Image: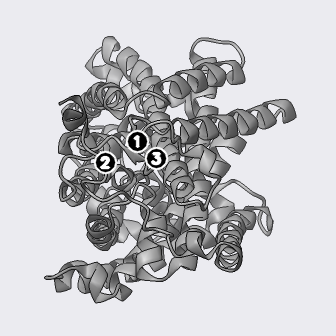
Amino acid sequence: MQVALARRTLTPTGLWVLGAAASAPMVVLAGGIPATYAATQVTGVPLVFLLVGGVVGLLAVGYTAMVRQVGHAAAYYAILAHGLGRTWGVAAGVVALVAYNAIQISLYGLVGATMAAQVGGTWWVWAGIALTIVGVLGVRAIVLSTRVLAVVLAASLLIVAVFVAGAVAQPAAGDLSWEGFVPGGMAVSGIGGAFALCMAALMGIDASASFAEEVVDRRAISRATIGVVVALAVVYSAAAWAMGVAVGPDKVAAVAADRAAGLPFSVLERVGGVWALLGEMMLIFAIVTSMLAFHNVVARYVFAMAREGVLPSSLAPSSSARVSAPRGGSLVQTSIAVAVVGGFAVTGADPVAALFTWLSTLGALGLLCLLLGASWAAVMAPAGVRGVRPGVWSWTVAPLLGLLGGVVVLGAMVFNVGSLLGAARGSLYPYLLPGIVVAAAIVGAVWAGHLRQSRPEVYYGIGRGTPKTHAIPDDINVSI
């Protein structure tokens, strides 16, 4: 019996919410933007966000073109399987599981440390509470998760807007400075790190593709994904510019590096103390909802790969044809998170400097590599995958331009990984992270080779296990 996710339960608006909530605008405002200024000394961060957003937008064109044709819950796994070959697909699936898990689990360190600083207590206790909340919501229907995400996202965007308005109303220099958009502000040694951190801030925009089987209209995935990229690139650029305006472009790096300065909450206090308090509250909620979004993506990857036999089939429930939530994948993700967070807690590692920084960097590296792979798969996809009327822009021009820009950003991330992680000069430990991505791909390729030899029927079904449209009726038909 074929097993499917609950079809036609997610609206185009819900898709947009999932992608934007995964990136977590409030987390970028409170953590990503100040960290970028502090670590790189680049005054042109607002311009960098726009440039990186352009690169990600180009990469998203080929990615979503493939998603429309493939329509698979494990998006990268199926895209590379159809475009480059089944072995590449399994390699991408393993890398995706590592990358999405890394980003999701890294946030437990951030939420634990933030709650411990604001309320008191031990970070891993707060992380455990967040883990329980995410685990409970993760086994419920996606509609419930989307409603929670939508409320938190709307509140987060409101606070970002208030922050920008407050900064513009009281500029440090007395008038508005546009130095953040001057190209000369990028001509400094830290520009590579700035590109890397801005790219990391946009990771998660690809999350909506994993819900292709559940969306009302699959064509909405392109609009939702590219819409999220454009919207967040503009929002983050405006927020970064406003931060420079609020304290002065020449001082923003030093102020951002000083935790006592309290950016961005010190700016919100100018508008009214209640906004600073709301900002601190929404930061917690935004971290948790970002974790929930990534949790749902990981659960769907596990479910989809298990349904095809690449992972143990027991992880794809077969008690009923229609699955409202992939419980097996959800429980696997929760179990992995418990083990990793527990390991960091036992060893006494710093929840931000170690758990959050290292794993989020690992996740960003992996997801950028997957976006590059998806664009190349779009370029190389056979005619049978492209459809009857493939567009040159979607299948060739945009993916190739995205590949050119993406390779540059990936190089910046790899060559600056040591400084981003605060490692000593000359240390090789940070380069373990790119090594983990490569190792994950190799493990996937070796496993695909094993399947080809021992279970050829599974191998030839890789990326092709999504049930046909009428193989399993929609819920409304079942009730009739």
Q: Nearer the viewer, mark 3 or mark 1?
A: 1
Q: Are marks 1 and 2 in contact (CB under 8 Å)?
A: yes
- Give above or below for 384 relative to 409: below
Q: Which mark is residue 321?
A: 1
Residue neighbourhood size for the residue with mark 3, other residues' Cα within 10 Å, grouped as few (<14), some (14–19), many (≥20): many
Type of residue at label 3?
A: Val
Q: Is residue 453 visible?
A: yes
The Cα atoms of the two marked residues, 3 and 1, are separated by 20 Å
Q: Secondary structure at mark 3?
A: helix
- Left or right, residue 16 beside residue 186: left
Residue drawn at x 32%, y 56% is: 46
- Left or right, residue 468 beside residue 357: left
- Nearer-N-terminus badge (3/2): 3
- Left or right, residue 236 beside residue 442: left
Q: Secondary structure at mark 2?
A: loop
Q: Quadrant of the C terminus?
A: top left
Q: Which mark is residue 472?
A: 2
Q: Is residue 175 visible?
A: no
Q: Which mark is residue 297?
A: 3
